[in-house]
Amino acid sequence: EINQGYAVDFLPWLVPFYTMHMNKLSKWSMEIRKFILARIINDRDQNLEDEDKEKDFTDALLKSLKEDPNVSRDTIIFMLEDFLGGHSAIGNLVMLALGYIAKDPEIGKRIQQEVDLVSENGSRLVDLEDLEKLSYTVATVFEVLRYSSSPIVPHVATEDVTVAGYGVTKGTVVFINNYELNTSERYWDNPKTFDPSRFLERTNDAN
């Protein structure tokens, strides 16, 4: 895991002092790659026929390996590693959302009403095609991200640019203060209040 509060996460010049930590991350990465190759890619690749319908994203990637010359086996591995690595972030997001819903049961009731309507009272599962009908549920996710996103996110400039009159050369580490952006009264009404409805579209007919 990265961005877990280590100083080296946002001060890259400290890397020489974190050799053991970096070696541990490298070892974990190699173990994950071996698992992906042995338990996911190789097994699926051997049993996937050209005429078979893709069951998931992995099948689609493996088929693209045969159809697109620009796709390599490393490309597939990198993309699957990103998916696996994102699981902890998604897990944290879900736990935060459940916490806010528990503190405000009315939010949970509105989400449940949407889900019941879309799923026909549980007669089927909700899928991505239902997203447009789950406006309040999506708004709640957006509000969780606004309210609880990481306060400082490091980035690296990919080209020479000017920001607010200051020159930033390519390769410079740039910090974005998410906390200020997400809690500023300049951009939000009552920013310290958890309110998913702020992300709902308001029309002239809205009450």
Image: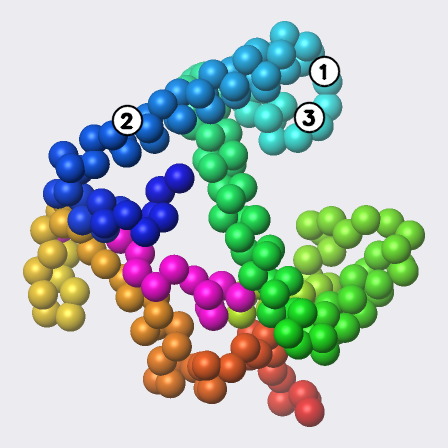
Q: Residue at x 55, y 25 (%)?
A: 61
Figure check: 184 above or below 93: below
Q: Which region of the structure is painted magenta?
A: 144-160
Q: CA distance from mark 2 to mark 1?
A: 43 Å
Pinpoint residue 131: horizontal percent, then vertical percent.
68, 58
**Closer to us: 5 or 35:** 5
Pinpoint residue 103: horizontal percent, then vertical percent.
64, 74
Q: Which-is-in-front pick, marks 2 and 1?
A: 2
Give the numbered dot on residue 54.
3
Query: Which residue matches tag 2?
Result: 23
- Relative horizontal placement of residue 122, taking residue 145 as reference (left or right): right
Q: Is residue 83 visible?
A: yes
Give the numbered dot on residue 196.
none
Q: Residue furthest bottom?
A: 207
Query: Which residue matches tag 1?
Result: 51
Pinpoint residue 164: horizontal percent, then vertical percent.
15, 70
Crowd rating for badge 3 (residues with CA inside 10 Å; few <14, some 14–19, many 20+): some
Q: Quadrant of the N terminus?
A: top left
Q: For residue 96, what is the image quadrant? A: bottom right
Q: Which-is-in-front pick, marks 3 and 2?
A: 2
**Closer to us: 189 or 132:** 189
Q: Residue at x 47, y 16 (%)?
A: 34
The secondary element bearing badge 1 is classed as loop
